[in-house]
Structures are given as structure tokens and as C-alpha cells.
Amino acid sequence: MIRFLIVVALLLLLGVGAYFYLNRTDVSDGTAPQVVGAPPSADVLARGEYLAKAADCTACHTLPGSAKAFAGGVPFKLPFGTIYSSNITADEATGIGSWSDDDFVRAVREGVRKDGKHLYPAFPYTSYTQLSRSDVLAIKAYLFSLPKAPQANKANDLSFPYNQRWAMGFWNAAFFKSQRFTPDPSQSPQWNSGKYLTIALGHCAECHTPRNLGFGLEHGNELAGEELQGWRAYNITSDPTHGIGAWSDSDIASYLTTGHADGRGSASGPMAEAVENSLRFLNSADAAALVTYLRTVPAHEGKDPITIDTEAAPVMASNQAAQGGDSANADNVGLHLFEGACASCHQWNGKGQQTPYASLLGTRGVNDVRGTNVTQILLHGSSLHAEGPNIFMPGFGDAYSNTEIAALTNYVIGHFGNKQGAVTPDDVAQRRKQL
Amino acid sequence: MLSLSVNGQSYPVDVPDDMPLLWVLRDVIGLTGTKFGCGIAQCGACTVHVDGQAVRSCVLPVGSLGNKAITTIEAVGNTPSGQKIQQAWLDVDVVQCGYCQSGQIMSAAALLQRTPNPNDADIDAAMSGNICRCGTYVRIRAAIKQAATGRPELLQTIVSAPEGASS
Amino acid sequence: MKRQDDPIDPGRRKALQSGGLAIAFLWLGGAGTAAAMINARRQPSDAAVALADGNPPFAPNAFIRIDTSGAVRLVMPSVEMGQGIYTGCSMLLAEELGVGLDQITVEHSPPSDELYGIPALGGQITGGSTSTRSTWQVLREAGAVARTMLVTVASAEWHVDPSTCTVDRGVVHHASSGRSLGFGALAAAAGKLPMPDKVQLTDPKNFKLIGKPMRRVDSPDKIKGAAQFGIDVRVPGMKIATVAACPTMGGKLVDVDDKAARAIPGVVQVLRLDNAVAVVGEHFWAARQGLQALNITWDRGANAALTTQQLRDALADSARNGSSIVATDVGSRPTQGTTVESEYQSPMLAHATMEPMNATVFVTSDKCEIWTGTQVPMRAVEEAAKITGLSNDKVIVHNQYLGGGFGRRLETDWVEQAVALAKQVSYPLKVIWTREEDIRHDRVRPMYHDRISAVLDADGKPAWYGYRTSGSSVLARFAPMAMGKNGLDSDAVECVDEVPYDIPAKKVEWIRHDMPEGLVTGWWRGVGPTHNLFVVESFMDELAHHVGKGPLEYRRALLQKNPRTLAVLNLAAEKIGWSGQPLPARVGRGIALGEPFGSRVCAIVEAEVTPQGEVRLRRVVVALDCGIAVNTSSIEAQVQGGLLFGLSAAMFSGITIRDGAIEQSNFNDYRNLRINEAPMVEVHRVVNVEPPGGLGEVGTAIAAPALANAIFAATGVRLYTLPVDRDLLVKNSDALKSVVSTAAVHEGRNLT
Ligand code: FES
Ligand code: FES
């Protein structure tokens, strides 16, 4: 992040004129393409609710397990400190009850709050800027229809200079462009709707698009995958090898709305939250629109591309109850841990026992030789409340050492991905600190 | 209304699809030999056979079962491997408090079914998901081997079963 | 506190001398309410109990029922929690009665102090290694009474002298005339006979069962899933509840929003207590779903900010500076010589019995029935009476098989909670704790901070040792009257006030350091000895190392006046091949020796420590001198099981507290040894007819120091805290930078 400082310093030199030029605001209302699941604007509350879900306001503004919806206080650990989300209920004193429509629209689309101070881009105004004014106001109407939750905002815990909100003006000048969504007339309405869902509401790029040195999104490399808060958001471009080009439409739709696609994987970590709080509420037409758009995202290999072995030899040699081949590796620490704590759900044939969500064969996690997400799931567990039974895996971080987690991750990568895992105990120690 | 096939008998049960088999067996059907130990597939106390495979019933939604054959500890003795395992369990005197043993026996019977002569690594692979707090592991290992080979396994103080010993 | 069906000895010397729990029960004995206790002969209340128990034609006392088919049922005065007491008691009865263990069935006793009360305990209680010792004489006599009566009937029918008759496997024989009659044929007539005044007990050298490795009587049911544990009880009309108590120790319930919970199909109702909420369902699943849907507001109370570190710091301070109660002060501390001093810490520990806490309770206006597995049915009765306002005799406890005790079921907290909940409803209520609840609301083994020091003489032998142990007192809460005159908790210093070694002078002090209110500490599988032996035996190794001696020879030199304990040391060393081939790098053997619970035991653990600090248990050899034995198979099983229980704790376990709540919750974070991590445990017994010692906790108490010493031998790192801190065992930091082994080579894969 030293480099970020340099960027900030350089920008200072560029001068005030450039600053204001680059910070200019698109004042147009914008028009949204059709979003099938959102009832027409007449029923503004229902529309607002659907859009608020599609925009996943809950993930950041409701503490998991809290009865106070949208009261904020959710921590975000970033490399430069911790940010807490704010209360967006209509409570006048602690929430946004006193905000006018214009105040709200400006905050959502420009990242500037009522008092004129800049918001941090942990709040995805960089994506929401594409939203139409009427959609933003529908969301506001919905939020204001909910119970007010008096709960004071928590002060952020950021170090200098990141605690200087004004500096975000420079960041915006460099990386943020205020602009509305413009439909592409050469594409189908469905495609346009999918794009709006992807880039504006769903703000998928915030996690899936690689970031540059200044923490801005790398344009031209959209959705090619990035690592954030210790989790890897995978490449979701149309690249058939490293992205999701080889997935069927129903694979993608199923993954988005249920958190699982057979032979492809199950959502966990932040993606599980996105499915749970947001994507599963999309109706089938909107999910299909999302798929249509994602299919057209230009293929990119992305950083540390993952190549999936869908027929990993060790798995093919195994049955559901025992690993194949000889037992000469019985001394392997990872195998020992797997047979004790993991096999009864995941099985050696990678199919998953009690639920297909536990299947491992063909997933990106076990084919990522750095084992990023496998490590996170082992340390912290995973849970997904979608349709049907709750899906969960307990975390093992508190009782298992870094060495054990590393050995287990490498075993899983070896067995289910047929690759040499590269996880060291030190890597696990690092990842422990990340959440 | 679901219909479950348990120990060769069919049971109509009126329960939600996502209810784990364990609780259907214990609280609805009334077969309490299958035990609850953790509820998160970590201890193996709830192990049953579904189509002959050892499965943790505490996390197995009944809705996914269809008419697959479920076997519990109450009937595993009707299978050849279950019968052998139970006999070895008696011969080696494995049991202590006994609470984990339904699950241990179900796991061991499934093992013997597919691997008639398991080595230590096979035993580890099949049995490591079953926790025993009383610490009967040494005898579990011995009993599985004895069930497989018919030969008494090394134990230090059980020299022989004297007259009058139950069998 | 779980103990083996102790081997027995009529003239036992060390009877109840050792163990805080045993002493607690001694006190209970003093305050016991029952006028009569178990008796080999029929008592006034026998008739009613036998009538309720199928009215067998022959029921000569509270323990034996024989009907006309010859079926023999034995009623157990104690409860079975894995320790094998049902087998031990059955062996005593069957030996004298003249039946095989395969010919009997066992029954839990109904509640009755008069018929099943253990004299030393003042009631029908199982614990403290008292069962066999208290029943040894009376149960054999009970068997002999029955046999005598059966023989009397047969000999009268045959007109022969009873002394010419023999009994074998349920049949009375008259050898010279070749006649015989089964018990069934004799039962009705025997039932009408008066009680014999005197009976002849079998000469021990003619024992057919006692002293042999007998198979357990409870196994046949347990391997078929037919044994009924508390959690398996099904009462007509019963509903099932599960509970959430305030996670913070001592916190209270403020409010609960149960709207969502009540909407779940199968949820019956939501019940509230002062500090807990329960959801009742048609089945456990509905109840649990309901519990998860509750929105509960807690008053987290005075402990809301409590952490383990605060407790640990305070404990350390009291060990160093607190004012103590002196347990032993013999001789004086030499002014000359080298002083060695160390401090050790032991963590809080959960029980995690395999069967989570549960109780089924039906409260009506004039009765409270309880089905549960408890080691203290009397206490359960008293507590339930207090809560329901009924008198003791209106409370009926149906005891069940216990899915593990380990001392957890000496408490009654979950029974009290279940009664308080059941009182609110009109149907029988089964309350089952989730595993999470079971661990978060355990009554943990206390944490300790111990400071040990020694002054070495010119030969390097300790001339004096000093010990200051600080921890909370379980005894003080459990049985305050059992505390020593000067306020000493004898359990706190067990195995350190007396050590096997020849050390001329010592001073042993205890600092009572109570935990904050709400953090209740309880019995475990051994309490005092489980940490004291860890400290003393680790320290013996430290001393040996300090003077450049091997751990075996150093101990041997100090045991010259203690041949019995020296013998177990030598036996264990011989069996593991101590002086054989040198061990590979980072493999070590550790010795621990002690005299816990009246037995003498030596464990040698062989362990390997990987460069990344992981510990692999390779092998354990135990040598044991526990005096004479009832069931040698049980002895081995108890030592193996106890040892693995102790190793599991030493390797992985520690309860920690954050924000006033226990952080661990289930087997994913309260880890337990699995079969692929468990070593082979060989048990070798010194066979003698010395008075017996305890067993169930012996293996547990000796495990941790043997492991710590093995790790020291393998790595040179001394562990002063438990559980094993693997970070300390890393060979060098580079070991953590490299990829840990993968299965590539062995799986024969083609790496891409
Ligand atoms: S109860 Fe199912 S594995 Fe523990
Ligand atoms: S026998 Fe008690 S838990 Fe296994």
C-alpha cells in the first residue's frame, strides 16, 4: 500500500484543475433496462425490495444473526484497517432518516454522504453509479418502509492517511467515473438486463475484477478473478479453461441461485453470502439474463489461472468409502486428517455424501494449487442458507494447527485436483490473520 | 408423506424433507439404537447403512433417500459382515459405556463388507470418523481384525474366555 | 470421576483414603438419611419392590430374582457408565449363587436407599471407587444366601445332607446319587423358606469367575443398539425440547422473540427460565430448528468481559504470592545445594461424554418422574423435590445406562433445568442438550497453576521439594463438609503430598483460588492427580536432565526403598525395550510414574515430533500394580481407555473463555483423539494379592507427563503448559516455509 501512497502523492501534483475535471459528476437520471423480477415502478416498495436484494444491501448493512436489519456495524477488515458499515435504516438520529432523495442518490451513486464527506469505496458506489435514479429511490422507499433501528455507527479504525476521507477525492479522480448505465441497442433486452444486474446491482466486479496498484478496478480485465479479504473470487469470464466458458447455462444459473452446480462447485465464504442474501432471490428470467451477459464477457486468463482436472486420477481410482490405490501413503498427515474429519461428508470419490454441496471433484477450490479458498473454508467453515436444508461445514481452525491445515489442503488438492499443492504452514498463518 | 425402507420394513413418515434421518429414526420411528453425538458429522455415533454404505444420519436429509435401503444397528446383525463384527465385539470385549458403539459397529461392518481382510490403513480410513470418548480404539482395531481372520488378536490380559463367559 | 469396578479385597487398607470424591462421599455417608443400607437378606421393603419387579417366586434379597423357568435376574445397586461395574457386581453374585454370567440378565435398581444404598456413601450413589469395595462382601453373601436356600430345598427333597450337594451353572447336583435339579424347579419352594442365619462363602482359591477376564454383561445389548441410555427413553405422550442457556457464565435471559420459532412446523411451544430458553417440539429436529429461529436478548452479566488470560494471570499470581494452606511440611529446606524451580499450567477441560446431557421428566400435581443417567440419583431426587415443591418420596428417578460419566454426571444441573422446564408443561418432556450446549455449559475440570521446586544434594538427588498449587476447589462446592479441618481440599494435593520417591523433606501448599461466580468447576476423570502428576513427573525429568542422568536411572535410584513401584518402572522399561536400539531422530520415549488412586503405574510413551512440530504417538506401554483383580479384562480396558482419554486431553484439549463464554462448542473445535491418532497401548500387570487400587482414572492421570517427557526426549523442548503447544516444537522456522507432504508419490498419480 506504499505504492498507493505514491499514487496519492502523484495525484496531488496533477493539480486542482485535473481534480475537479476528473471528479465531475454525471447528473443524469439514467434509465434502467427491464428487470423482470422487479415489479413495475408503480409498486415502488416491492420493486425497491427486489432491487435491494439484487444489490445485496444486507450483506454489508446487517450484522449476521442480528434482528436489526440494515442497522450497520458490519466490520470489513482491509489491509489498512477496519471499516464498519453504517446504519441505513430510517432512524433520524443514527440512520439516514433525515436524508433527502437527493442526499441518498448522491451517496449511492457518487459516494458522498449527506454531510459532504466522502465514503470509502468499500461501499460499491463505483458500481451503483450506473443505477437509475428511480431505482435508487425505490430502494430508499423500501428501506424507509422498514422499522427504524436506533444504533449509532461505529467509528472506523483506519490508519493515516487512509483515515483522511478527503483523500478519497483523489482516488475518485483516478479510478471512479460517475456515469449511468447505457443500454447497448445492438444487444438483446435480456443481455442489457443481465449487464445491469451484473455491473450495477450485483456489483460483481467489486470482487471478481482484478484491482490495480491503487486498488482501482483494472479495466480491460473484467471479471477475470481477484483475491479479496483472504478469499479468491474466481475468474467468471467466458474463458473455457480458466473461467466459466465451459459451464452450461443451467450450471451457471444453478450456481448463482442455489450456490451449487454439480461438478462445478459450491459457493462458500463471501460468495455464499451473496447467494444467500441476494442472488437466490432473482427470478429465473433475471438469472437467465445474468447468464446471458456473463457468457459474453471477454475471455481472460486472469492471475494465477486455475486449470481444472474433472477426472482427477486419484479420485477415479477411489470409491465413496475408500481411496484407491495402495495404502502406502497412510502416513500422510493430510490423509489422516481427511479420513477423520472430512471423509464422512466429502467421500474419497469426490461425490459428496449427504449433500451434493459436499462434492469436491471438478471444483476450482481443489484445483487451485495455492489452496486459498480451501484453506479459508477449513479454518472458518462455511454455511449457506438457500432453498432446502441449510448447508454448513464447521470450521477447524481453532483445533488444528497451521501445519495440519496446510497438509490437509495439499492432500485435498492432490487427491481431488491431481496437482501438487503449494500451501505451507506459513501461508495458513497468513490466512488466519486475514479474516 | 415420505416412505422409508428401514431394516427391510417400510415406514410412512410425515416429516419435512430436510429433517435428518437420525431424528426420523429416533423420534418418529422409534429406533433408538442409532445415537446422537454431535450433529455435524464429526463423531460417527449416528452411522447407519444406506444401500450398504456407512453414512452419518445426523446430516442426511430424509427427503434425499427415496426408497434406498436403510439398515440400522438393530438389524445389522442380519448381514454376514454385521454378524461377524458383533461377534468379534463380544469376543474382544470392546464395549465400555457403549454409546459410540452402534456407530462403530456400523462403520466396521461396512468396512468388512467391502474389504474382507482390512489392514491397519483400511481400518484407519473406515473408522477414523468414529469418536470413542471411553478410548476403546485398541480393542476396536483388534476386533475388526479378529472378525476378518477369525484369529484371536493380541491382547494382554484376556488370556482365554473361561467357562461361564457369555458369548 | 469414573472408576473401574475396583478389584476387591475384604481387608482393604487404602479403602477410601485417596481421592477428593471418595472423601466427599464419606461425608455424605455421615449425613446419609437412609436408616438401612444394602443387605444380603430380605428387608421389609423388599416385598413391594419384588412385587413391582414381576413378583418372582424366589427373591431372597434385593439383588436376585429367579423364576420357575430358572431365569436369573440380578439387580444392580450401582450405575453402569462404561466402567464395568455391572459385570463386577454380577461376578460377585454369580460366583456365590453358582451361575454363569451367560445365564443372567441385569437390571437397573429402582430408587431405594434402604435396599441399594452404599453404606460409605449414605445412599444409592455411584462414584469414588466405592461400589465394589462396599459391595464385595454383601453381594457375595447375597449370592450365597440364595444358593443356600436353593440347596436346602433340593437336599430336603432328596433327603440328603445339604453339604453333599454342589451347585454349578444354575443346577443343584447330588453327585453320589446322580440326581440334579435346576434353579427353576426349586424356586417356588425356596421362596417360602426362612432366611438362613449363616452362609458359607466360597474359598477364593476356588473362584470360577472372580479374578478371570470375563466378558461384560452389558455388551450383548450394547452391540445391538438395544441398551437404553437416558437419551433413548420414550414415554407415552412425550415431547422433546432443546435448550439454549445464556452463553455467558452467570448471565440471564432478558427477552426472547419466538415468533419465527413458533411458526416452524412441529414446534410445540417455547419455554423460558431465568437464564435459558427451551423450544419444545414433536421431535428433536423441530425443537432445534425452533431454537435456531429464536431471537434472544441476554443480560450477559458480571462476567461479560471475562477471558482465559485474566483467569490465568490471576491464578499465576496466587500461585506465586497467595497465602496458602499447608498440606504437608516434613523436614526443613536445606540451605545448601542447587535449587531447581519450574511453573506449570493446566487448562480447564470439558467432559464431552459421548451421550450429551439429557433428562426426561414428567411432573404432575403429586409426582415427579425422572428418567436420566446419573451417578447421583439421590441428589437428583432432592433437587427435583426442591424445584417442584414435592416431597422426596414423590420424586422417582428411573436410572439408565450412562453414555459416559467422567464425573460430569455427578452433577445434577441438567436434571434441575429439565425439571424446571417440565414443571411448566402438562406432558412428559425430554430435554436434550445439543453438543454445543453440552460443551459450552459443561462444569469444567479446573485450571491450575503449579510452582514446583527442589533442592538437589551433592549427588544430584532431591533433598527437599516444595510445591505450591493454585486452583479452584471442586470439593468445597460439592461437599463443603468434606474439606479438611484447616480448609484443605485433599484432592488438590493428591499425588504430590506423597510421592513414590525417597525424598527426605518436603513442603506442599495449596492456594485456594476460586473462579468468578458463574464459572462452576467440576469433577473429571481424575482431578487432582491429573495435573499434579503432570507437574511432578515432568519435573522429575527436569531434575534428571539437570544433573545429566537418564530419566530411568534417575528414578530408579530414588526408588530403592519402594520395591513395588520400582517393579512397575522396571517392567514398563523392559517391555518397551528401553535399553535396546537407539531411536530415530525426533523420536523420544517418556516415562511417567505414580501411585494414583492406590495403584502403582508406569507409562512409557513413544512419540515422534515432525520438523513442523506435529506429534505422532507411536506406542505406549503401561505397567500396573493394582493388587488383586476381579475382572482382568476390565482392568486392561480401563487402563487403555483412561490413557487414551488422558492423551487426547494432553494433545488437544483446553477450554478457553472469551467474553465470558466458553469458546469451544463441538468436536470440530474441542478435538478428540481418533483411532488413526491413537497408539497401541500395551498393559502389563504385576500379578499379586496386594490390596487393590483404583483403575479408571489411573491411565488418565499418568498420560500427560509421559507424553510431555517423550516430547522432551524427542525435541529437547520442555512443555510447561497443556495442551501440547505445537508451535514450540517446530524445529526451525524454515520448516514452516516448505510445503507439507502431499500424497503425490504414493498415489501413483501423473502430476500435471
Ligand atoms: S451425531 Fe452424526 S456424526 Fe456425530
Ligand atoms: S464406549 Fe463410551 S464412547 Fe465409546
Image (spheres, coloured by chain):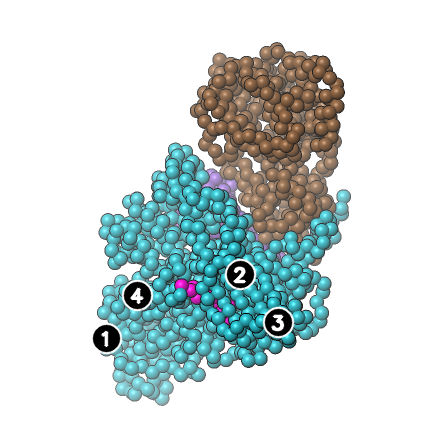
Query: Residue A125, relative to residue B54: is it above or below?
Result: above
Residues rendered magenta in the picture: C487-501
In reply to whether residue A115 is colored magenta, the answer given is no
Respond whether the residues carrying marks 2 and 3 are from the same subunit: yes
Which of pointers 3 and 4 indicates the residue nearer the eye? 3
Q: Amino acid at mark 3?
A: Gly
Marks 1 and 2: in contact by CB < 8 Å?
A: no
Label 3 SS:
loop
Q: Which residue is mark 3?
A: C337
Q: Amino acid at mark 4?
A: Gly
Q: Which residue is mark 1?
A: C192
Respond whether the residues carrying marks 3 and 4 are from the same subunit: yes
Classify mark 4 as within 8 Å of ligand 2 or not, answering yes or no. Answer: no
From the rendered image, report the letter of the chain displayed in purple.
B
| Residue C233 position within the rendered picture, expressed as x and y whole percent measured from the top left | 37, 53
Does label 2 or label 3 sit earlier along the sequence? 3
Does label 4 or label 1 sit earlier along the sequence? 4
Which residue occupies 35% across, 41% down? C271
| Residue B42 position within the rendered picture, expressed as x and y whole percent measured from the top left | 54, 50
Number of callouts: 4
Q: Amino acid at mark 2?
A: Asp
Does label 3 or label 4 sit earlier along the sequence? 4
Classify mark 2 as within 8 Å of ligand 2 or not, answering yes or no. Answer: no
